[in-house]
Image (cartoon, rainbow, N blue to C red):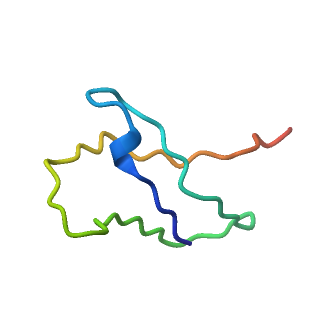
C-alpha cells in the first residue's frame, strides 16, 4: 500500500495526524508490519520529527 502526503501544507511547530492507509487481518493473525518514509523530489528538507506512530482500529470490536 502506498500513500503520498504533501507535508509542506501542514502547520509548522504543531503535531498533525496523518491517516496513511487501511489494512485488515484475521483473528489470531501474526506477523510484521513495515512502515517507511521517503522524500520525493530533489529539494533538501530542513528536517522532520516523528513523535510516534499509532496503529489503531477504524471500528472498535463489539463484545
| Residue plotted at (42% across, 69% down) | 34
Residue, far right: 63
Apparent side of residue 5 relative to residue 39 in the rendered image (left or right):
right
The quarter of the image holding the N terminus is bottom right
> Where's residue 22, x and y in %?
65, 59
Depth check: give the residue in front, 44 or 60: 44
| Residue plotted at (85% across, 39% down) | 62
> Where's residue 27, x and y in %?
74, 63
The quarter of the image holding the C terminus is top right
| Residue plotted at (53% across, 55% down) | 20
| Residue plotted at (74% across, 67% down) | 26
Apparent side of residue 62 relative to residue 19 in the rendered image (left or right):
right
Depth check: give the residue in front, 57 or 2: 2
> Where's residue 14, x and y in %?
33, 26
Can you tell which quarter of the image residue 60 is in?
top right
Residue, far top: 14
> Where's residue 7, x and y in %?
36, 47
Can you tell which quarter of the image residue 13 is in?
top left
Amino acid at each position: 500500500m502506498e500513500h503520498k502526503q504533501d507535508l509542506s501544507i501542514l502547520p509548522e511547530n504543531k503535531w498533525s495526524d496523518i491517516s496513511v492507509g487501511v489494512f485488515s487481518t484475521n483473528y489470531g493473525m501474526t506477523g510484521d508490519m513495515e512502515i517507511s518514509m521517503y522524500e520525493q523530489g530533489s529539494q533538501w528538507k530542513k528536517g522532520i520529527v516523528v513523535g510516534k506512530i499509532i496503529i489503531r482500529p477504524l471500528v472498535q470490536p463489539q463484545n
